[in-house]
Image (cartoon, rainbow, N blue to C red):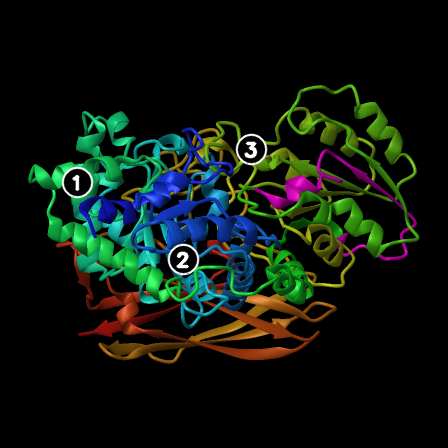
């Protein structure tokens, strides 16, 4: 290979399809012929994939196939709930299944690599991109990272249904200043190692093929040029052997960061810091050959990066067959479409969180004869897709209205928007009120559009936008039963809404089967099981908010002035991490620790007796937390260490056991290495992180 051809393997360009950042659409055919392109972004479909691969194989000197990449975040043709919504299921098997289904559909259309899973811990609801990630908890994010990697990649990347996964954004992207997209993050190395990087370690342990550095800088060092994190931590400490791919145009944006004076310097800095593939900035292809001549970049290092890229292409089977694997990929999709739609419905069911349910209004009776569906999201199929909907189509998406109409074909349904989703116009509220006059129950569909969350969609006001509050207040004043359905990519701060509504469901952005899944929950065909993977704030001023904070010298005490509180609002969230109601009623009767003294290499064994006091069978979700009472470094008041899901029939009791390896008690010590210290620990079990609902036991660790 010539030096330019080697640089070409490290160059990713955008195809004719829509791009995800600034820049012009590029003419790529001639560059492919010249061997100046190794990867192509935003391309799928048999006709176009075959065309560009034939150029690479038949018209370039070396005939190296292209690596075709696309953002398959939560589905390709079949759209599953957005990642934050799907995290509510606390179901690793489901996360793996939906990733596998997405990989199957995308690979059938020629895509070989996806830029997922997104594993950014997000604790600030102003940041719109939290919709794409796992929520606030490190343990949960690690489970999702491993499950999604397994689902996308399968047992072998050479399988026709496998897709190379890219864990992103390494690291601390969710800690951007003021929740503002692309802004700086200033976190300690301890926090990086303890909070933000373990999900990536889990994905690496599961074999993730690629890693993408974040856009942001950390304490002044942009991640695209952060050799310490990309080499010392990622390569050495975490043992990553795969490909590092920059984010869109991120190498060129080192100029904006102020750490490179021109594109040549940016390319040298990014490559020497550990980036293998430059996405869309054309910095590597233009600068690396010259940088080698000038002694600024090692040819040996270029060869190492090229080998990593070629090895990935080999693992994907692209050298044997770079084309879509079936003569008619649409047949593959059609064959499994029913299965994928069924899976999408299940995922949506498990993503819905019942936040409030006064007087047990839900589930609704199927004998209802007159319902009103009011609000801008009542019949908005596009909003159900959320951001990163890939090749999903609005016309194949089930809206809330369609789902309810299908479930109750003999019920009279009034449908009216009432207000625009964003505008302050209240002129249509009177029509909405008129539509509600005869309704037995009102389904009020509020929230934010798909464009109001996701990348570059930060908000300073995380309440219901536009005139939606005015509509809601007018509806509440009718005195009829009102169920609120919240469509969003983040928690919406609206205490007034939870106070006045008879029931509220967090319906997020549920994907292709949104309406059917909603109807299943509303009318009791499915008992809700969704639990919040985030703490739901009362107001934007609480951000960032999360359950596992450190105690501080003056811990939060309601009514105590000189404690860690606000003078105008409670410090606690509207709903705690793990919150979610059921149509069943579960109680924890006993909690015991069977190992009051444990040693290195042992396990902490606890048991809890669980009872279903409700009138129907249901699934309980139990969260197990620990607290290290005295340590060399202050520890959080709660740390999640495990989740158990238990199905109980009406009146049934069951003894539930949980085992925790002593090694799971280790933490990042004073010297920034993993430390295990003797001492007393508390272990808790509950149905959320709400301290009032936790049962506690203690044990001692002896070393």
In the depicted structure, whether residue 123 falls above or below residue 46: above
Please give left or right for residue 681 compared with residue 158 in the image: left
Q: Nearer the viewer, mark 3 or mark 2?
A: 2
Instruction: Give the mark nearer the N terminus: 3 vs 2.
Output: 2
Residue assigned mark 2:
165
Instruction: Give the mark nearer the N terminus: 1 vs 3.
Output: 1
Q: Nearer the viewer, residue 545 or 232?
A: 232
Give the spatial CA distance, label 3 vs label 2: 26 Å
Q: Which residues are magenta?
A: 360-386
Residue 73 makes an appearance in the image = yes
The reply to whether callout 1 and callout 3 are in contact (CB within 8 Å) is: no
Residue 337 rendering spot, x and y as whole percentages: 66, 62
Badge 2 marks a residue whose secondary structure is: loop
Q: Nearer the viewer, mark 2 or mark 1?
A: 1
Residue visible at 62% across and 48% down in the picture: 392
Work out which quarter of the rendered image holds the C terminus and state it. bottom left
Give the spatial CA distance, label 2 vs label 1: 29 Å
Residue 289 — which label? 1
Badge 3 marks a residue whose secondary structure is: helix
Crowd rating for badge 1 (residues with CA inside 10 Å; few <14, some 14–19, many 20+): many
Give the spatial CA distance, label 1 vs label 3: 42 Å
**Residue 117 covered by magenta stretch:** no
Residue 584 rendering spot, x and y as whole percentages: 68, 65
In the depicted structure, whether residue 187 falls above or below residue 458: below
Residue visible at 55% across and 33% down in the picture: 452
Badge 1 marks a residue whose secondary structure is: helix
Instruction: Give the mark nearer the N terminus: 2 vs 1.
Output: 2
Crowd rating for badge 3 (residues with CA inside 10 Å; few <14, some 14–19, many 20+): many
Residue assigned mark 3:
452
Q: Nearer the viewer, residue 201 or 434?
A: 201
């Amino acid at each position: 290979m010539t030096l330019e051809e080697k640089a070409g393997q490290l160059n990713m360009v955008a195809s004719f399809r829509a791009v995800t950042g600034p820049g012009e659409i590029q003419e790529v055919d001639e560059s492919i012929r010249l061997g100046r392109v190794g990867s192509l972004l935003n391309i799928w479909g048999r006709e176009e994939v075959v065309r560009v691969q034939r150029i690479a194989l038949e018209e370039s000197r070396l005939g190296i196939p292209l690596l075709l990449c696309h953002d398959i975040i939560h589905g390709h043709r079949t759209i599953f709930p957005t990642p934050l919504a799907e995290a509510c299921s606390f179901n690793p098997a489901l996360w793996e299944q939906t990733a596998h289904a997405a990989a199957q559909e995308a690979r059938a259309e020629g895509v070989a690599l996806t830029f997922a899973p997104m594993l950014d811990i997000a604790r600030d609801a102003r940041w719109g991109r939290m919709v794409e990630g796992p929520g606030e908890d490190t343990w949960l994010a690690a489970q999702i990272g491993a499950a999604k990697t397994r689902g996308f990649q399968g047992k072998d990347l050479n399988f026709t249904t496998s897709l190379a996964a890219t864990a992103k954004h390494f690291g601390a992207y969710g800690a951007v200043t003021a929740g503002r997209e692309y802004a700086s993050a200033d976190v300690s190395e301890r926090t990086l190692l303890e909070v933000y990087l373990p999900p990536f370690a889990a994905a690496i342990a599961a074999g993730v093929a690629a890693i993408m550095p974040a856009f942001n800088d950390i304490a002044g060092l942009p991640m695209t040029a952060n050799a310490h994190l990309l080499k010392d931590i990622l390569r050495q400490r975490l043992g990553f052997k795969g490909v590092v791919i920059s984010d869109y145009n991120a190498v060129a944006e080192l100029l904006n960061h102020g750490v490179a004076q021109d594109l040549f310097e940016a390319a040298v800095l990014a490559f020497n810091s550990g980036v293998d593939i430059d996405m869309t900035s054309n910095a590597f292809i233009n600068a690396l050959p010259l940088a080698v001549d000038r002694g600024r970049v090692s040819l040996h290092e270029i060869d190492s990066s090229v080998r990593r890229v070629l090895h990935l292409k080999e693992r994907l089977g692209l050298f044997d067959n770079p084309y879509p694997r079936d003569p008619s990929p649409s047949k593959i999709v059609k064959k499994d479409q029913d299965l994928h739609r069924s899976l999408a419905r299940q995922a949506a069911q498990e993503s819905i969180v019942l936040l409030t349910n006064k007087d047990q209004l839900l589930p609704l009776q199927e004998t209802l004869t007159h319902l009103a569906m009011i609000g801008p999201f009542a019949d908005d199929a596009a909003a159900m897709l959320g951001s990163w909907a890939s090749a999903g189509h609005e016309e194949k998406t089930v809206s809330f209205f369609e789902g309810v109409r299908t479930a109750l074909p003999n019920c009279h349904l009034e449908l009216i928007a009432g207000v625009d989703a964003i505008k302050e116009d209240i002129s249509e509220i009177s029509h909405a009120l008129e539509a509600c006059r005869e309704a037995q129950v009102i389904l009020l569909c509020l929230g934010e559009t798909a464009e109001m969350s996701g990348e570059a969609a930060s908000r300073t006001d995380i309440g219901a936008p536009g005139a939606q509050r005015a509509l809601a207040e007018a509806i509440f004043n009718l005195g009829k039963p009102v169920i609120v359905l919240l469509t969003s990519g983040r928690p919406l701060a609206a205490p007034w809404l939870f106070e006045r509504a008879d029931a509220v469901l967090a319906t997020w952005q549920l994907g292709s089967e949104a309406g059917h899944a909603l109807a299943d929950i509303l009318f009791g065909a499915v008992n809700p099981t969704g639990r919040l993977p985030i703490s739901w704030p009362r107001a934007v001023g609480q951000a960032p908010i999360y359950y596992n904070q450190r105690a501080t010298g003056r811990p939060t005490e309601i009514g105590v002035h000189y404690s860690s509180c606000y003078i105008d609002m409670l410090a606690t969230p509207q709903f705690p991490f793990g919150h979610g109601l059921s149509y069943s009623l579960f109680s924890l009767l006993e909690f015991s620790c069977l190992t009051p003294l444990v040693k290195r290499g042992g396990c902490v064994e606890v048991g809890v007796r669980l009872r279903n006091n409700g009138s129907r069978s249901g699934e309980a979700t139990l969260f197990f937390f620990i607290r290290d009472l005295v340590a060399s470094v202050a520890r959080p008041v709660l740390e999640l260490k495990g989740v158990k899901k238990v199905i109980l029939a009406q009146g049934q009791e069951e003894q539930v056991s949980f085992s925790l390896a002593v090694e799971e008690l280790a933490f990042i010590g004073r010297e920034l290495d993993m430390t295990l210290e003797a001492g007393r620990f508390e272990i808790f079990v509950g149905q959320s992180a709400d301290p009032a609902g936790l049962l506690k036991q203690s044990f001692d660790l002896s070393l």
